[in-house]
Amino acid sequence: MTEHPEVQHLLDEAVRERGLPGIVCEIRDEHGRWFGAAGAADTTTGRPRDAREHFRIGSATKAFTATVVLQLAAEGRLNLDDTVDSWLPGLLAGDDGTAVTIRQLLNHTSGLFTHTDDEQVRSGSGWRPEQLVRIAMTHPPYFAPGAGFRYSNTNYVVAGMLIERITENPLAQEVSRRISEPLGLTATYSAGAETAMPEPRPQHYSTLFDPAPDAEVYDLTEGDQTWSGAAGDMISTTGDLQVFLHALLTGRLLPPAQQREMWTTVSTEGAEWVADTRYGLGVFEQKLSGGTTVYGLAGATMGSWTWAMGSRDGERVVVTHTNGDWNDPLEVFLAVLRTQFDSTVPTHH
């Protein structure tokens, strides 16, 4: 196994300099598996972070939802160019339902307003998907379907409803049957209305987006995730995300035609999303400052940020997670990725 002192240094620095509570990183490559950690899973007891911990993966959930949709396409049960209205008549207000396609939901080109930007959603709990969509529909769309890219959680809530309409099963059941069970992901599941978190777990610490340096920190470990649903309610581990991303990159979950669809990307430029990215169907590619492009999935939810990226052939996969959501953890994640993928950065073997 290769040691990664350069990554361990970045993890230690993230806790020491940025004040993040705890951070972990798991790397898998031709030399095997390496796991590094810094800081605490629980700042009250000082319990260290460890490799078996469950955490909320936020929008990394979208890759699971998109995979199920693409498998249904492979089975001939839907077409990516079907309109939402053909499966869920009347769900989307006005012309949106007859114009928005399933593909536009998955690559965020539908123009649908994201319900998570509506004040009442974050303060409520016990949401049902149709309620979230109804709230989104009270806002005008960002643009006509297909006219641009704008990241919207509503797209994936609708995609989850489509899966349930077509399969006549709960989304969580389809994810489990089609992805978790075949890949042996024993710690990965949809939280649904369940707020408790399985052990072991890090506490999830959030400043609730308060940018002040002395912002109060809240423990949101047992938070309601129904506001995100099929867009972000799943729980996993670094090990399970490694296996899942490797399967996505190597085509283990999808036939070639759907694999191509998943990784066909659109520009995210000018959309106030992550810089230097292009978005596929539930996954994205990211160009690092040294020029290398990495591929994967990511998620940020209150008190939990996850970044999982790999080489296009899946030979090297890096999963990083922090249990605090302030001081821009993305900078740390990118620094870790540069040590592993940018040839200009010296690595230690």
Image (cartoon, helix red, strand yellow):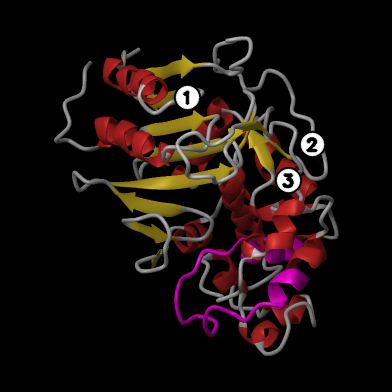
Residue 210 horizontal/vertical position (percent): 54, 45
Which residue bears the numbered disc 2? 195
Q: Are marks 3 and 2 in contact (CB under 8 Å)?
A: yes
Residue at 38 percent of width and 19 percent of height: 16
Q: Are marks 1 and 2 in contact (CB under 8 Å)?
A: no
> Where does the magenta region start and end?
134-162
Q: Which type of secondary structure does the marked residue at label 2 adopt?
A: loop
Q: CA distance from mark 3 to mark 2?
A: 7 Å
Which of the 4 image quadrants contains residue 74? bottom right
Residue at 71 percent of width and 46 percent of height: 175
Q: Amino acid at mark 3?
A: Gln
| Figure check: 116 above or below 48 | below
Q: Which type of secondary structure does the marked residue at label 1 adopt?
A: strand
- Numbered badge on residue 225: 3
Circle 1 crowding by C-alpha within 10 Å: few under 14, some 14–19, many from 20: many
Residue at 55 percent of width and 11 percent of height: 48
Residue 315 seen: no
- Numbered badge on residue 23: 1
